[in-house]
Image (tube, rainbow, N blue to C red):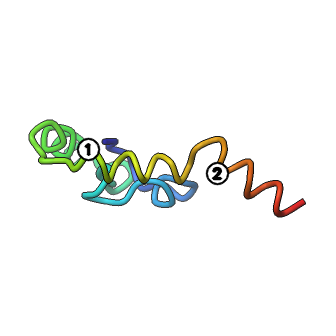
Amino acid sequence: PTVSYNCETGPNEIIRDGINGFLVQTGNLRELYNKMIESVNYSWDYSIIKDTVREHSIEMISSKYKDIF
């Protein structure tokens, strides 16, 4: 699981809040700290996390680029 700021470019395309990590408001240090602590104690479903990782694997992404070209 990952904790990330929900900045403009990317994290919300990869991280599903509460599924494979947490997104926090950009620049909010208190929220970042709290979510980091929460992530340690959270009951993650690692099989779901593995599935979300596969969606962004080199094989999947390169296949999408190949389709574009």
> How many residues crowd mark 1 within 10 Å: few (<14), some (14–19), many (20+)?
some
Which residue lies most toward the bottom here? 68
Residue 16 locus on image (x, y percent): 36, 59
Residue 48 vs residue 36, the one in the foreground: 48
Tell me the amino acid under the disc marked 2.
Answer: Met
In which quadrant of the rendered image does the N terminus lie? top left
Helix, strand, or loop for circle 1?
helix
Left or right of 36 in this view: 8: right
Residue 31 locus on image (x, y percent): 21, 49
Residue 25 locus on image (x, y percent): 33, 57
Which residue lies most toward the left here? 41
Residue at the spot of label 2:
60
Left or right of 68 in this view: 62: left
Residue at x 67% of width, y 50% of height? 61
Tell me the amino acid under the disc marked 1.
Answer: Leu
In which quadrant of the rendered image does the C terminus lie? bottom right
Residue at the spot of label 1:
32
Helix, strand, or loop for circle 2?
helix
Labels 1 and 2: the sequence-earlier one: 1
Tag nearer the camera, 1 or 2: 2
Tag shown at residue 41: none
Residue at x 27% of width, y 44% of height? 46
Residue 59 vs residue 30, the one in the foreground: 59
